[in-house]
Image (spheres, rainbow, N blue to C red):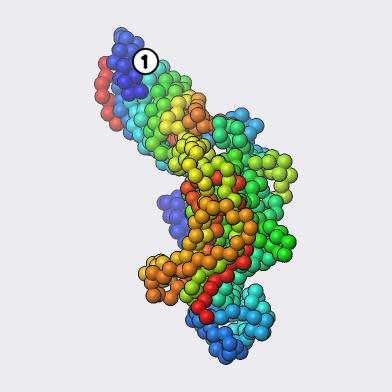
Amino acid sequence: MRRTLLIISFFLLLASCKKEKDPEDASIIGYAVTDLNQSVLALDVVYTEESEKCIYLLFNGNFTAASFPLEFTAEFSLTEGAVSLPASGETVSFNNKDDRFHYIVTASDGNVIDYYVVLRDNQIPDSDFEDWYLATGMDGRGFYEPGLSAEATVWATANQGTSTFGLYCTTPYETGDGKAVRIVTGETSLIPVTAGTLFTGKFDVDGAINNPTDPKKATDFGMPFSLRPNGLSFRYSFQPGARYIRATLKNPTNIFGGFTVTEIEGNDSFTAYAVLERRDSNGITEVARAELISDIAVDQMTPAVLPFAYSSDQKPTHLYVVFASSKDGDLFTGAVGSTLFVDDVELLYQE
Amino acid sequence: MRKRLILLLTFVLPSVLMGQTYKLTLYPSIGADVGGAVPFPLSDIPAGAKWTPSVNPSLGAGLKFTLNDRWDLIVEANYHNLEFTAEADVRSQPYFYGDQQYVIYFSGHTETDVEIKFLEIPLMAGYSISNNWILTPGLYYSKIFKSDFSTSGQDGVTSTDKAITDNAVLPGPSNPNYDFDDYMDTWDVGVLLGFRYSLNHRLSFTTRLQTGFKSIFKADFDSIDYEMYQVRLSVGVAINLINLWQK
């Protein structure tokens, strides 16, 4: 009897052991801007990216030096039991367009969450490619990525994915009067052709690791954007590589299983495209697209203007711009050595 | 394998058993397994490696041919689920590819999760040491239905240049995943040694230590520079249910 009681007590004790609770999430809800000290610029949309804990203030004009300091009063509510520092109703101030305003939100269980407020005007930040920050590759060594910092940049490359091989396909290039982006199709001991790329969004390292046979899954395209530009302009030069090839996985699910390489007639092409999308509870709707694909060698930096073709009247929520030195790089197709230079990306608006 | 067993039972056993007193007993059994896969050579086990097995139930049935007072011949069919995790800090662990022409090295922390579900058919001799204790050496064949083997590198450095991973300052930024499911073999053979303790004529307790003769990976898998062999400890209870035949 005593033994039975002991056993029952043991199981009751086990059953009473509570699972450790996950830290509580806390959110800023309904962020609203009032008393903006600007008459020239108008705030178009406040967009909260909850997964990034980031609030984007999307303005409909172009920031100039005269836009700063930019100040406003922020009103918002919080998840029940949470507190924020600063609190709702406090003045928020930005001294330049690259500032990030920091809220410290503390959930009712004490879990601290950092929220940031970010300014965006009618252009893509860092699109002159003068600023590059030092990132750390898989091999622990440094390489340069476009933008001011990993946290602030809107631009991404696939350099992180190829850093294991010491290969960086997208690099800064000194032009003599500043920097441009040099995007080159390369090769590694693992993959016979790997296109260089530059895009707005994030390179998803986990996506790359978990889906090595599907390069597109390593990209998370897009940045919050709400305007309807007429076109996209940039300057570029392009030189296709000598041997245009298609590499086919011997085992479609195994990147380490090797490739069969076949030569293709013609030249490799670069691609540049921009897509406006509306992302909401109904899914993703393409609103407009601008695109250029070319296999023509262009030696000197040359301006290009791509008009947006609108297919929807909806207001966009996101924009992504993609440059790739081989248009079918995601299909392991291209020419090693294809080189695309890009500079001065600009969104165009009707006067 | 099934054909071989039938042949054994049909032709070999009767000639061995001629003139003997024997009986054939059917017994169901339940038990529990704990085990892992051990790298060979053993020197490939990283210093400080940690192994965490799961204890999983097993279920099966057996036939025991009692040949004489000393010897039994035992054949079983048991379903097992071997599950374990292993952790280790590694330095320049190689991963080969392209017919071993190329290699990627990883330095950092690794976590390996393994789960193997299989039907095991052991063939054992039973030798009575005393009234209650029987020694059961034998061989086994396993048909593996499902194998999951994944390793995740954490907070490390990955490079094709060994000098970089040899000298890497850790923790690093690399968190690679390696999935070996496709390289796991679908069968295993090995040797076992066990004991059976008969509490009475119905109830027996069993314990066995098994180890594979072959790597858990397919023969053509050459991406890692060591083999891994299944090692498992099983304990169980068998109930002599039916005496099918007796002479």
Q: Is residue B23 left or right of residue A290?
A: left
Total marks shown come to: 1
Q: Is residue A298 left or right of residue A274?
A: right
A137 in relation to A46, above or below: above
A183 in relation to B233, above or below: below
Q: Position of residue A290 (x, y in %)?
A: 47, 65
Q: Position of residue A114 (x, y in %)?
A: 60, 72
Rendered-image quadrant of the C terminus of chain B = top left
Rendered-image quadrant of the N terminus of chain B = top left
Chain letter belonging to callout 1: B
Which residue does the image show at 72% across and 50% down from the upper left?
Answer: B169
Which residue does the image show at 45% across and 29% down from the upper left?
Answer: B188
Instruction: From the viewer's side, name the closer residue of A247 and B204.
Output: A247
Which class describes the residues within 10 Å of circle 1: few (<14), some (14-19), or many (20+)? Answer: some
Q: Quadrant of residue B20?
A: top left
Which residue does the image show at 45% across and 26% down from the upper left?
Answer: B189
Q: Quadrant of residue B90?
A: top right
Instruction: From the viewer's side, name the closer residue of A178 and A198.
Output: A178
Instruction: From the viewer's side, name the closer residue of B28 and B144.
Output: B144
Can residue B113 be seen by looking at this rendering? Answer: no
Label 1: state its secondary structure: loop
Q: Position of residue B2 (x, y in %)?
A: 32, 23
Q: Which residue is mark 1?
A: B68
Q: Position of residue A267 (x, y in %)?
A: 52, 46
Which residue does the image show at 30% across and 12% down from the upper left?
Answer: B11
Instruction: From the viewer's side, name the closer residue of A192 and A233.
Output: A233
Can residue A346 be seen by looking at this rendering? Answer: yes
A286 in relation to B48, above or below: below
What amino acid type should be assigned to the residue bearing mark 1?
A: Asn
